[in-house]
Amino acid sequence: MPIIQRPYVPPEDKPPQEDSYVNPGDIASLNVNTATAPAAAAVEAPSSLDPITFYSDSFHIFSSLYSAVLFFGEQVEEREPILRARIKVSPQMMKAIAVLAAKHVREYEEAVGPIPLPEQVYAAWEIDPDEHSH
């Protein structure tokens, strides 16, 4: 079975609606009934200030004149990727992220070797692979 990389793309290339997104770090969104299980809620519920760690193998950017939204998802078997995080940033922050990420990739490749990407990745994002190869 060939490995196919599909970037997370919100339906109709639009960001999900605010009410459809659950913040993984929000205690209220964990749906824990503290009246019936206060001890479990105190032990298992993370603080909303705790950093959220998750794996992402799917990514999409939706941008406008004044902001960008970075979508991080996780591919699960043959289904559409599951949205794990949505991060809103300014265009300036998006550029800073791109510059810093490019620096880290360059340093990694200098130390370890090239990171090949399948043609499907470039095709899915409509990017010319020759412009981004070293």
Image: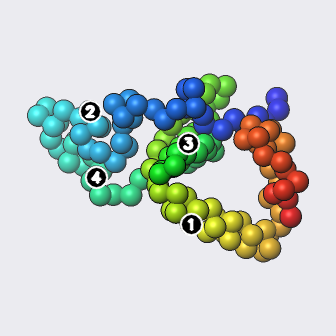
Mark 4 surroundings within 10 Å by alpha-carbon count, few (fewer than 14), some (14 through 19), many (20 or more): few
**Is disc 2 surrounded by few (<14), some (14 to 19) or many (20+) residues within 10 Å?**
few
Q: Position of residue 58 (x, y in %)?
A: 62, 42
Residue at 41%, 53% (x, y): give it: 52
Query: Label 1 crowding class (10 Å Cα cut-off): few <14, some 14-19, many 20+?
Result: few
CA gap, disc 2 and disc 4: 14 Å
CA separation, marks 1 and 2? 36 Å
Give the numbered dot on residue 96.
Answer: 1
Q: Who comes first in sequence, dot 3 or dot 4?
A: 4
Q: Amino acid at mark 1?
A: Ala
Indicate left or right for 20 with 69 as reference: left
The three-letter code of the residue at mark 3 reads Phe
Name the mark nearer the viewer: 3 or 2. Answer: 3
Residue highlighted by disc 3:
62
Q: Residue lying at the far left in this picture: please name it.
A: 35
107 or 38, nearer to the observer = 107
Which residue is tagged 2? Answer: 31
Decide which of 132, 113 is in the foreground and name it. 132
